[in-house]
Structures are given as C-alpha cells and as structure tokens.
Image: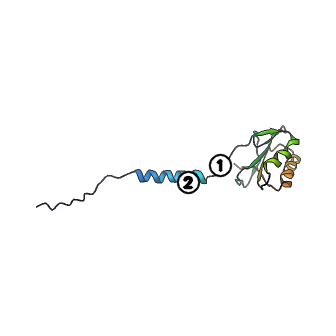
Amino acid sequence: MGLQSKNKIESAFSMSSMTDIIFLLLIFFMLTSSFITPSGLPVNLPSSETSDIVMQEVTVSITKDLKYAVNDRQVSRNEIKNELTALLKDKQGYVVLHIDKEVPVEHLVEVGGIAASLEANVTIATKPFQ
C-alpha cells in the first residue's frame, strides 16, 4: 500500500531573495547619502563646532593667494557677479563659499554680499574639529 505523500519539502535554501534585499538596501543608502564634492581650488578650510552638509548648487572658492573659482572654473574677481547671476538666474539656490582660512575677511564679505544680493542662501564651508 503506497501511503507516501506526493508533496515533498525541499530542504535547500534559496539565496536569491536575500541578494535582492541586499541590493535594494545598497541602492537606498547610495541614494539617500549626502554627496560631498570637492571644491575647484585646493583651500585650507577653517574648523567649526558644527559642520552641516548642504547640497552644493554653486560653489565659490578663494585660495590663500586670492585665486577665485566659480563651480571649478577659474575666474577673475570682477567676473564673480556675472558668473553668479548666470548660474542663479530664475531660481533661488545655495552658494557655498570655500574660502581658505588665511584669506582676509573682506573678500569673504564681498563674495557673500554679491550672492546675498542675488537672493541666494549663502553657506560657508568648514571642516569639523578633529
């Protein structure tokens, strides 16, 4: 008499669903992590207690030997207003200032004033205390 069951349970474990979950988590963390892009010119940033991360739409860099760059493109001091006007045209955006800590404050105030006059949110890039 054949009383054996026709439904057999497979004892093998399928890893395909586990790899799907891992890839979905990897994609999720890659999309939600903040991306930090280096500024165009090498600058020695000042330190601060808090260092917030802001999406960088427009960056202005000033090196200690007073070389200016807007979004990785080197410009003269007189061209900064024209460049920022073109980049911030018809939108309110963030302007992140990457200014070397040895640059006199008057240059920071000048560039920050230009960006503020264009109704942009101005942020100064810093590095956290070590």
Residue matched to label 1: 35
- What percent of the width, then of the height, locates residue 127? 72, 48
The furthest residue to the front: 90
- What percent of the width, then of the height, locates residue 80? 84, 44
Distance, label 2 to label 1, CA atoms, is 14 Å
Give the residue displayed 24% in from the left and 59% down from the top.
Answer: 7
Numbered label attached to residue 28: 2
Give the residue displayed 83% in from the left and 49% down from the top.
Answer: 85
Which is more toward the observer, 97 or 23?
A: 23
* Vertical placement of residue 81 versus 119, above or below: above
Numbered label attached to residue 80: none
Which is more toward the observer, 128 or 13?
A: 13
Left or right: 44 as drawn, with respect to 109: left
The answer to whether mark 2 and mark 1 are in CB contact below 8 A is no
Q: Quadrant of residue 42?
A: top right
Left or right: 9 as drawn, with respect to 40: left
